[in-house]
Image (tube, rainbow, N blue to C red):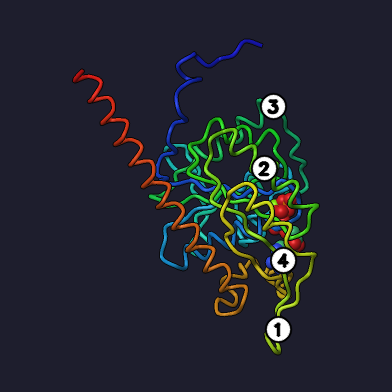
């Protein structure tokens, strides 16, 4: 099939997403390590800290964000034909799960995936957002590749558990981001330990250290760890992010710290971009003078 993009379109950086300043991916490599949980709770903690935040669910075949945020209705469509994100917990939410009936399979590949990704970002009337958090499917497949090529991403965080089964795949996800020049803000270790609700003692749940080895070897920051939350099932059932259910508990605190770390990483990335642009500008001016 002939490629429909012109040479210019293939070499140009991805177009901005209207209304959105910074886009942060939440990826993992391994499935089931808590990407969606981290994405939703990170977004909720950022919103609770006063940021204007949206979240988009790109796990087309296993969407969880609607469930985790308790959004139930399909987004309305504005006069301009764009979807209006649902409002929950101070977040602006777009999930494919709100648009396709639960009993209907979503089994797309190739161009359909690329089209769905474009629509979930660009056919949406995002309000003025500081941050759009993106929940990705597991692995490094079609959806992630489409995003890296078509969406202007500010940075990514990679979620893992402390065991090597998960960190090996986290390592692969980091490689993919490096190959596509997407800054990796750092590694988040989920379900690293259990904090006793009675005495506060911390009990590690897995062999420890594998995530620190990956972070060190790949020179990515350690963004901290999220304890296992015994109240997680209740939060899922009620659509209440655990970061908001008990903001002063160990899990709520961990998400508040993660939100601060991600906000700082976004600022650092923007400052770095400005510095690089200024340097390029000076070099060009020097060359023109010669
Ligand atoms: N910190 C936590 N404490 C307790 N349970 C958790 C925690 N993080 C995630 N879980 C639970 O682990 C399961 C998997 O989490 P989640 O769906 O967020 O993972 P995922 O990486 O998005 O999975 P998938 O790869 O299928 O998209 C869910 O049942 C979730 O409630
Ligand atoms: Mg998920």
In the displayed structure, does residue 288 sit left or right of residue 27?
left
Dot 3 alpha-carbon crowd within 10 angstroms: few under 14, some 14 to 19, many 20 or more: few
Dot 1 alpha-carbon crowd within 10 angstroms: few under 14, some 14 to 19, many 20 or more: few
Residue drawn at x 58%, y 36% is 147
Per the image, label 3 sits on a secondary structure element best described as loop
Q: Residue 202 location, x and y as percent?
A: 71, 79
Above-or-below relation of 211 to 274: below
**What residue did someone put label 1 on?**
201
**What residue did someone put label 2 on?**
173
Q: Is mark 4 within 8 Å of ligand 1?
A: yes
Q: Quadrant of residue 138?
A: top right
Q: Residue 63 location, x and y as percent?
A: 69, 49
In the displayed structure, does residue 281 sit left or right of residue 253?
left
Q: How far is the residue under mark 1 from the one under mark 2?
A: 33 Å
**What residue did someone put label 3 on?**
110
Q: Is residue 236 visible?
A: no
**What residue did someone put label 4 on?**
191
Disc 2 or disc 3, which is closer to the eye?
Answer: 2
Total number of numbered discs in the rendering: 4
Q: How far is the residue under mark 2 from the one under mark 4?
A: 19 Å
Instruction: Choose the circle earlier in sequence order: 3 or 1.
Output: 3
Q: How far is the residue under mark 3 from the one under mark 1?
A: 48 Å
Q: How far is the residue under mark 4 from the one under mark 1?
A: 15 Å
């Amino acid at each position: 099939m002939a490629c429909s993009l012109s040479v210019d379109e293939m070499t140009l950086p991805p177009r901005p997403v209207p209304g959105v300043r910074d886009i942060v991916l939440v990826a993992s490599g391994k499935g089931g390590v808590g990407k969606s949980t981290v994405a939703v709770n990170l977004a909720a903690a950022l919103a609770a800290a006063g940021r204007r935040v949206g979240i988009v669910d790109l796990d087309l075949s296993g969407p969880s964000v609607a469930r985790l945020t308790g959004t139930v209705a399909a987004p309305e469509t504005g006069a301009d034909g764009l979807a209006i994100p649902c409002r929950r917990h101070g977040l602006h939410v777009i999930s494919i799960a709100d648009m396709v009936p639960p009993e209907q399979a979503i089994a797309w590949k190739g161009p359909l995936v690329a089209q769905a990704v474009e629509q979930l970002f660009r056919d949406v009337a995002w309000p003025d957002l500081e941050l759009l958090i993106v929940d990705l499917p597991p692995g490094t497949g079609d959806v992630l590749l489409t995003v890296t090529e078509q969406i202007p991403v500010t940075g990514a965080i990679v979620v893992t558990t402390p065991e090597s089964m998960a960190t090996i795949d986290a390592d692969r996800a980091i490689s993919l981001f490096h190959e596509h020049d997407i800054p990796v803000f750092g590694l988040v270790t989920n379900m690293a330990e259990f904090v006793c609700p009675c005495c506060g003692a911390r009990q590690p749940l897995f062999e420890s250290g594998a995530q620190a080895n990956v972070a060190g070897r790949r020179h990515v920051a350690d963004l901290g760890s999220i304890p296992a939350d015994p109240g997680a099932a209740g939060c899922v059932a009620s659509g209440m992010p655990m970061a908001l259910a008990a903001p002063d508990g160990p899990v709520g605190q961990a998400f508040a710290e993660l939100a601060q770390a991600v906000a700082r990483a976004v600022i650092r990335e923007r400052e770095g971009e400005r510095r690089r642009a200024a340097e390029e500008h000076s070099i060009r001016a020097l060359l023109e003078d010669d």
